Image (cartoon, coloured by chain):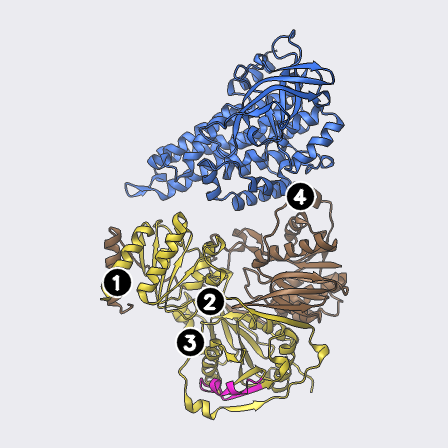
Chain colours: A blue, B brown, C yellow
C-alpha cells in the first residue's frame, strides 16, 4: 500500500521519536526488571501519543485507526513494551468509552487519559474466565444508588499503575454465558480495591501486570458504562480496535527481527564468507520478509476498512491479529536461529524480541478465539 | 511580531553517498533531510511563539519538491510556509542566495518587531554564510552561534557561543540570529499537527514575482551570476589500504608497537 | 571614488585578517600569514596583515616575523571586544580604501561571523573552510596530480590564470571542490585553524615589518548590538587542534563508557601526552563535551598519530582526521569503513586490545 503524504509524515515522526527516545539502555533496563518508566510515560503524553485515536474535542489528536496502527508498529519495532505505554487509551480503554460512554463519562475520563494525566486499565480476565468470558464470577449487586463489586481479576496489564479500571462484572446472575455482564469504571483508590503482586512474565517487562481484588467496592451507578447487562456484548464491538493494535505491535517486533537478522547475516562470517551467502539463511530471510509484507498489507487495509465502516472489518481485525501474531512468532524463531548461539544471549536484541512476542498470540483474545470469530463470521 | 525561519533541504550525507563518474555528487540517489541546525532554529521560533503568540513563517529556497519539507515544519508548529523557487535561482552561491531570500522577505514584509532565525550552517555547503549575508542585505544586526535566546520586552538577550565560553549580546529587532544545536532539543510532531498542516498556506514565489525587488540584482543570482564559481571538483584518491594486524589482542598490539617504533612514531 | 568590487584589475596584494582576543593573537594568524607569504610570492605581491582591537599595536611585529610586509592596525576602544557591526565597518573601510586582491580570514567563531558580512557588504565572493590555496596554475596542477584522481595531463589548463584557486571539501568530505571568484575583488577565503602550517619565526622579518596606523571611524548609531558580558567556561579546554597524538572514542565503547574513556586516556598518555577526542556519536551521547568532537561538524585535526576506538568511520568522521599522519583503528567489525583509511587496523574487542596496546607501548618505549 502506498501511504499518502500525511501518513508518511506520521510514520517518520513516530520512527524518529522511537529511535531517539527508546534507547538501548532504556530497553534493557525495562527488560531486566526496571519497573514502569514514568519519565517515558510523560514524554509520550506530551506529544499526544496516548490520544492518537481520540477526538480533538476530548483532548485527543483526532487521528484515525491507521495513524494508531503506524504508531504501534514504529514504537514496537524499537521497544515492544513501550508501544504498550501508548496503547490503552487508544484501544481497550478509549474504545468502550467512545462507543457507549455518556457525555459526562467521556468528558471526565477521556481528556485525562488522552493527555496521560491518568491511566486506565482493562479488567476482564479472571482465573476462571479467560477465553470464556461466561466464566466471569465478579459480581456487581445494586445497592441504593450504588453497586457493590466483589471478585478477582487477573493478568490485568497496567493494574499496578492505573488510576481507573474498566471492570466487567455480572449484574444479572440469571442470564447465562456472557450475557448479564456489565462494565463499570472503577476508581482504583476506592476502599476495597487492591492490587496483587506484579507477575514475573516471560517478556514485556516494564509494563506491570497483576491481579485486581475487589472487596465490597462501592461504585456509584453513574460509573456504569454502557447498557446494563449488555456490557460484554457491547464491548465485543469495540475490542477489534485493540486487535489491530496488537497486530501492529507484533508487526513491529517482526520487522525488528528481520532487520537484526539481515544485519547479523551480513556481518557474521563462517567458512570464509558471510552466512547470508548460504541459501539456508537467505531463504529464511526471504520467508520472513514476505510474511511481514503480507501482514502489513492486511493490517493497513483493515484499518482503513474499519474506519470506513466496512461490514467485514471486525472479522478482518481478527484475521489481522491471528495472522500477524502467529507470523511474528515464526519470524522471531527464525531470527534467533539465524543468530545461532548469540541469539540466546541477552546482549542481542533478538533474545528479548523472541520472549516479548510470545504473548501476542495470547492476550487480547488468543489465536483460537480469533479463529472462532472468523469461522463464526463465515459459517453463520 | 513575526519570526521568519530560514531552512534548507539538504542531502543526507550521514549515510552512504554515491559519486558520479565525473566526480560530481549523485544527488538523485540521496535522501533529502531538513538541515539539522534549522530544526533548532525552528524550535527556538516555536518557543517564542508559545511565549508571545507570534506568527512563524518557514522560508526556503529550493525546488518545488521542498514543499514537503515546509509541510513538515508547519506540522511542527509554524503557521505558514514560503517557498522561493525558480530556474533562474538555481546554482546560486551564498551571496546570490542571501540576496534572493532577503528580497523575498522584504516582499512579504519585515516589520520592526520581526526576527529572522537560521540554523548556523547547512551540512552540504558547511559555509555558515547565508545567515550573516541576509542580515547584511537587510541592513539588520546579526548574532551568530546562538545557544540561547531570551526575550525581555523589546530586546533579545542572546547567549553567543565562543570556542572557550560565551558572550551575552543584547540586540533589538529587527535582527537575525543563527542557532547552534546546543540551543535546544527540537520538539517532535504530533498527529494533530500533521493533520492540520495540510490546511495551512504555503506561498510560492518565483523569479517573475521577485525580479523587481530592489534587493535582487539579476546579474548576481543563479549559477552564472554568483560571484564564486566551481572551477573544478574532484574526488580525493582513496588512501592505499592499510595493514590489518591479526592474532590475539597481545600479538596484534605487539606487532603494532614494533611498526610504530620502526617509523619513529613513538 | 566609489568602491567597485567588479574593477578586478585595481586590486592588489594579499591580506590576512589577524584576530586577537583580549590582547592575544591566535595561532591561526601565524598559520595564515605563513600561507599568505607563499601566495604573495607566487603573485609577486605584498603580504599585509590587518589587526583590529584596542591597544593592540604592540602585537603587530610578531605577525611580521612570519612573513608579513606590513601590518595595518586599527586601534580603538570600540574594538576591544568583537561586535559584528564595529569590526565589519572598520574592516570594510580599510578594504574599500586600499583594495586588496585577496583577503584571508581564520574560520574561528568570530571569523565565520565577520567574513560573510564583509563579503556581502563588499559585493564579493567568499569561500569558506578552504584547505588548500594556489595562485600559480602550475602549482595547482601539481596539487591535483598528487591529491586527486584527475588525469591532469589530459586537461587543458589556462596557465596564465592568476585567480586564487580555493579548494575545500564539500558534501561532508565526499568531494573536493576548487572555487574561484573571477569577477569580483577582494577574493575572500576563510581557513580553519590548524589547516595551514605555521612557518618559522624570523626576527629580522619582524624587525623590518612596517606598521601603519589606520584611523578608526565609528559612530554610536552604527553599533547595533551590545555585549553585556564575556564568560569563559571553567571547563578544561581540550586542544585537539595542536595535539600530536589523539585517541578518539566512538559508539564502540558503549558497553562500558567509563572504562572506555579511561582506557583512551591511558593510551593517549602512553603514546605521548596525547589528548582524547570523539566521534559525533560519542558527543551526542554526552560522553565527551562538544569541544572534543572531531569530524565534519567538529574539529579538523592533523596529529602525528590518530587512534580510533570503536569508531565505524563514517565519512563525517573521516573528514576531520583523514590527513593525520598515522591512523590506527580498533573496531570489532572488520567491514567498518575506518579500516579503509587506517594505516594499521586491529579487528577485535577494544576492551581487550587497548590494554594490550598500552602494555606494549610502555614496554616498547623503555
Residue C69: within the magenta? Answer: yes
The span shown in magenta is C55-73
Q: Secondary structure at mark 4?
A: helix
Q: Mark 1 sits on what residue?
A: C362
What residue did someone put label 3 on?
A: C197
Mark 3–mark 4 Cα distance, whole angstroms, equals: 52 Å
Find numbered disc 3 in the image and state the secondary structure of the residue it sits on. Answer: loop
Mark 2 falls on what kind of element?
loop
How many numbered marks have been drawn onto this rendered protein structure? 4
Q: In this picture, is A128 found above or below B82?
A: above
Quick check: can you spot residue A1? no
Front label number (2 vs 4): 2
Residue visible at 48% across and 54% down in the picture: C286
Left or right, C137 with reference to A161 = left
Residue, disc 2: C237
Front one among C259 and B215:
C259
| Callout 1: chain | C
Q: CA distance from mark 1 to mark 4?
A: 59 Å
Q: Which residue is mark 4?
A: B194
Q: CA distance from mark 3 to mark 2?
A: 22 Å
Cα distance, mark 1 to mark 2? Answer: 27 Å
Foreground residue, B47 or B195?
B47
Residue drawn at point x = 58 percent, y = 79 percent: C186
Q: Residues within 10 Å of mark 1 (few under 14, many from 20)?
A: few
Amino acid at each position: 500500500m502506498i501511504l499518502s503524504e500525511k501518513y508518511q509524515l506520521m510514520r517518520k515522526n513516530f520512527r524518529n521519536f522511537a529511535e531517539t527516545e527508546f534507547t538501548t539502555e532504556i530497553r534493557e533496563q525495562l527488560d531486566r526488571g526496571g519497573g514502569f518508566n514514568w519519565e517515558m510515560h510523560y514524554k509520550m503524553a506530551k506529544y499526544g501519543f496516548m490520544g492518537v485515536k481520540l477526538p480533538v474535542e476530548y483532548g485527543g489528536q483526532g487521528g484515525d485507526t491507521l495513524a494508531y496502527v503506524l504508531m504501534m508498529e514504529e514504537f514496537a519495532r524499537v521497544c515492544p513494551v513501550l508501544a504498550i505505554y501508548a496503547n490503552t487509551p487508544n484501544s481497550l480503554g478509549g474504545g468502550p468509552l467512545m462507543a457507549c460512554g455518556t457525555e459526562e463519562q467521556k468528558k471526565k475520563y477521556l481528556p485525562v487519559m488522552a493527555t496521560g494525566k491518568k491511566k486506565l486499565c482493562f479488567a476482564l480476565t479472571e482465573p476462571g474466565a479467560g477465553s470464556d468470558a461466561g466464566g466471569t464470577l465478579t459480581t456487581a449487586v445494586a445497592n441504593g444508588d450504588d453497586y457493590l463489586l466483589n471478585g478477582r481479576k487477573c493478568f490485568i496489564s497496567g493494574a499496578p499503575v492505573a488510576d481507573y479500571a474498566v471492570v466487567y462484572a455480572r449484574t444479572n446472575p440469571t442470564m447465562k454465558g456472557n450475557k448479564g455482564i456489565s462494565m463499570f469504571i472503577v476508581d482504583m483508590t476506592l476502599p476495597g480495591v487492591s492490587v496483587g503482586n506484579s507477575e514475573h512474565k516471560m517478556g514485556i517487562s516494564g509494563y506491570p501486570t497483576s491481579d485486581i481484588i475487589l472487596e465490597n467496592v462501592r461504585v456509584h451507578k453513574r460509573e456504569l458504562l454502557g447498557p446494563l447487562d449488555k456490557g460484554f456484548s457491547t464491548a465485543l464491538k469495540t475490542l477489534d480496535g485493540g486487535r489491530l493494535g496488537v497486530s501492529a505491535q507484533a508487526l513491529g517486533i517482526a520487522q525488528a527481527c528481520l532487520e537484526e537478522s539481515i544485519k547479523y547475516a551480513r556481518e557474521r562470517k563462517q567458512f570464509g564468507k558471510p552466512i547470508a551467502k548460504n541459501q539456508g539463511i537467505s531463504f529464511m530471510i526471504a520467508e520472513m520478509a514476505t510474511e511481514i509484507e503480507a501482514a502489513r498489507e492486511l493490517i493497513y487495509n483493515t484499518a482503513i476498512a474499519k474506519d470506513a465502516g466496512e461490514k467485514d472489518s471486525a472479522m478482518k481485525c481478527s484475521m489481522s491479529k491471528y495472522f500477524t501474531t502467529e507470523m511474528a512468532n515464526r519470524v522471531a524463531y527464525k531470527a534467533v536461529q539465524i543468530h545461532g548461539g548469540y541469539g540466546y544471549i541477552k546482549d542481542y536484541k533478538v533474545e528479548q524480541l523472541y520472549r516479548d512476542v510470545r504473548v501476542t498470540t495470547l492476550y487480547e483474545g488468543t489465536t483460537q478465539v480469533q479463529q472462532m470469530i472468523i469461522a463464526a463470521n463465515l459459517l453463520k | 511580531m513575526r519570526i521568519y525561519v530560514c531552512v534548507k533541504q539538504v542531502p543526507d550525507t550521514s549515510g552512504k553517498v554515491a559519486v558520479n563518474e565525473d566526480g560530481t555528487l549523485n544527488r538523485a540517489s540521496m535522501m533529502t533531510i531538513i538541515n539539522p541546525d534549522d530544526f533548532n532554529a525552528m524550535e527556538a521560533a516555536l518557543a517564542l511563539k508559545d511565549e508571545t503568540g507570534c506568527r512563524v513563517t518557514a522560508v526556503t529556497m529550493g525546488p518545488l519538491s521542498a514543499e514537503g519539507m515546509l509541510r513538515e515544519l508547519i506540522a511542527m508548529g509554524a503557521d505558514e510556509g514560503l517557498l522561493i523557487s525558480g530556474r533562474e535561482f538555481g546554482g546560486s552561491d551564498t551571496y546570490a542566495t542571501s540576496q534572493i531570500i532577503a528580497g523575498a522577505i522584504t516582499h512579504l514584509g519585515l516589520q520592526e518587531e520581526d526576527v529572522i532565525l537560521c540554523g548556523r550552517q547547512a551540512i552540504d555547503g558547511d559555509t555558515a554564510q547565508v545567515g550573516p549575508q541576509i542580515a547584511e542585505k537587510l541592513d539588520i544586526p546579526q548574532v551568530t552561534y546562538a545557544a540561547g535566546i531570551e526575550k525581555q520586552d523589546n530586546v533579545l538577550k542572546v547567549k553567543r557561543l565562543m570556542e572557550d565560553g560565551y558572550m551575552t549580546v543584547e540586540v533589538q529587532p529587527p535582527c537575525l540570529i543563527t542557532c547552534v544545536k546546543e540551543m535546544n532539543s527540537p520538539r517532535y510532531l504530533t498527529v494533530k499537527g500533521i493533520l492540520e498542516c495540510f490546511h495551512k498556506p504555503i506561498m510560492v514565489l518565483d523569479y517573475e514575482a521577485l525580479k523587481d525587488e530592489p534587493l535582487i540584482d539579476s546579474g548576481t543570482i543563479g549559477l552564472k551570476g554568483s560571484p564564486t564559481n566551481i572551477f573544478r571538483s574532484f574526488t580525493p584518491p582513496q588512501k592505499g589500504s592499510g595493514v590489518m594486524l591479526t592474532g590475539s589482542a597481545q600479538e596484534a598490539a605487539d606487532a603494532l608497537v614494533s611498526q610504530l617504533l620502526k617509523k619513529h612514531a613513538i | 571614488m566609489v568602491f567597485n568590487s567588479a574593477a578586478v584589475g585595481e586590486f592588489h596584494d594579499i591580506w590576512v585578517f589577524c584576530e586577537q582576543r583580549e590582547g592575544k593573537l591566535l595561532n591561526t594568524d601565524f598559520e595564515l600569514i605563513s600561507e599568505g607569504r607563499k601566495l604573495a610570492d607566487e603573485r609577486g605581491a605584498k603580504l599585509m596583515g590587518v589587526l583590529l582591537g584596542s591597544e593592540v599595536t604592540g602585537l603587530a611585529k610578531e605577525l611580521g616575523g612570519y612573513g608579513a610586509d606590513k601590518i595595518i592596525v586599527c586601534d580603538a576602544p570600540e574594538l576591544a571586544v568583537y561586535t559584528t557591526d564595529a569590526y565589519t565597518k572598520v574592516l570594510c573601510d580599510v578594504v574599500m580604501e586600499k583594495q586588496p586582491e585577496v583577503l584571508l580570514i581564520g574560520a574561528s567563531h568570530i571569523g565565520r561571523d565577520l567574513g560573510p558580512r564583509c563579503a556581502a557588504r563588499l559585493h564579493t565572493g567568499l569561500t569558506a573552510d578552504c584547505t588548500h590555496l594556489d595562485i600559480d596554475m602550475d602549482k595547482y596542477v601539481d596539487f591535483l596530480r598528487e591529491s586527486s584522481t584527475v588525469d591532469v595531463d589530459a586537461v587543458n589548463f589556462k596557465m596564465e590564470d592568476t585567480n586564487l584557486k580555493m579548494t575545500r571539501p564539500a558534501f561532508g568530505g565526499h568531494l573536493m571542490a576548487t572555487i574561484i571568484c573571477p569577477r569580483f575583488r577582494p577574493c575572500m577565503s576563510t581557513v580553519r585553524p590548524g589547516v595551514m602550517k605555521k612557518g618559522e619565526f624570523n626576527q629580522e622579518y619582524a624587525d623590518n615589518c612596517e606598521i601603519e596606523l589606520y584611523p578608526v571611524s565609528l559612530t554610536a548609531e552604527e553599533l547595533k548590538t551590545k555585549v553585556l558580558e564575556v564568560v569563559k567556561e571553567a571547563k578544561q579546554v581540550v586542544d585537539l587542534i595542536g595535539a600530536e597524538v589523539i585517541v578518539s572514542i566512538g559508539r564502540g565503547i558503549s558497553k562500558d563508557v567509563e572504562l572506555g574513556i579511561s582506557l583512551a586516556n591511558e593510551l593517549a598518555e602512553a603514546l605521548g601526552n596525547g589528548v582524547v577526542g570523539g566521534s559525533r556519536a560519542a558527543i551526542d551521547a554526552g560522553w565527551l563535551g562538544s569541544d572534543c568532537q572531531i569530524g565534519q561538524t567538529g574539529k579538523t585535526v592533523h596529529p602525528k598519530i590518530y587512534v580510533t576506538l570503536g569508531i565505524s568511520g563514517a565519512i563525517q568522521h573521516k573528514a576531520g582526521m583523514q590527513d593525520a599522519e598515522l591512523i590506527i583503528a580498533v573496531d570489532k567489525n572488520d567491514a567498518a569503513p575506518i579500516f579503509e583509511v587506517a594505516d594499521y587496523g586491529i579487528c577485535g574487542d577494544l576492551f581487550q586490545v587497548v590494554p594490550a596496546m598500552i602494555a606494549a607501548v610502555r614496554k616498547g618505549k623503555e
